Image (tube, rainbow, N blue to C red):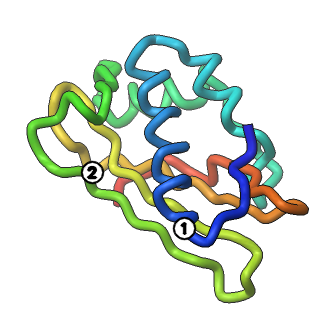
């Protein structure tokens, strides 16, 4: 599901990542990972198992519950940064876990391919 090129691209990219988080919150891990359309620049394509293992490590042996962003009682932490060379954008999105905004951040990259942006999950780490 590539993101179409648009003069107002930032809200579209944020919405794309939010739909990924919403799928995780609903327990649709494979559906969420299907939104990751290409491997990152290290050649790694994250799987559901990779993401769940990262969550378990973050939770010190317990997998925290991903919640839908609209269920938070606080604002989101998200940033969109354009690549200097004009080839795409990076989106850092703090994951909502166990009812709170966490410091575990999903880092997406969107690369221009023709008239659309293709999504990659670059990394998930504490930011």
Left or right: 44, with 93 as reference point:
right
> How many numbered marks appear?
2
In the image, 107 versus 84, the foreground residue is: 84
Q: Secondary structure at mark 1?
A: loop
Mark 2 crowd level (few <14, some 14–19, many ≥20, 10 Å Cα)? some
Q: Return the residue nearer the eye: 72 or 99.
A: 72
- Neighbor class of circle 1 (other Cα within 10 Å; few <14, some 14-19, many 20+) is few
For residue 103, the mark is 2
Q: Which mark is residue 34?
A: none
Residue appearing at x 53%, y 13% in the figure: 28
Proximity of marks 1 and 2: CB atoms separated by less than 8 Å: no
In the figure, 62 relative to 45: above or below?
A: above
Q: Residue at x 55, y 54 (%)?
A: 13
Q: Residue at x 41, y 30 (%)?
A: 55
- The label number, if any, that marks residue 8 in the structure image: 1
Taking the image as shown, residue 19 lies to the left or right of residue 77, namely right
Give the structural element (helix, strand or loop) at label 2. Answer: strand
In primary-sequence order, the first of circles 1 and 2 is 1
């Amino acid at each position: 599901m590539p993101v179409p090129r648009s003069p107002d691209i930032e809200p579209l990219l944020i919405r794309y990542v939010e739909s990924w988080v919403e799928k995780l919150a609903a327990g649709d891990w494979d559906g969420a990972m299907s939104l990751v359309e290409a491997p990152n620049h290290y050649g790694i394509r994250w799987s559901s198992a990779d993401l769940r293992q990262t969550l378990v490590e973050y939770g010190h042996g317990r997998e925290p519950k991903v919640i839908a962003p609209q269920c938070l009682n606080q604002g989101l932490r998200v940033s969109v940064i354009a690549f200097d060379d004009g080839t795409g954008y990076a989106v850092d999105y703090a994951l909502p876990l166990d009812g709170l905004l966490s410091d575990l951040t999903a880092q997406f990259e969107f690369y221009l391919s023709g008239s659309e942006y293709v999504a990659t999950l670059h990394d998930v780490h504490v930011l």
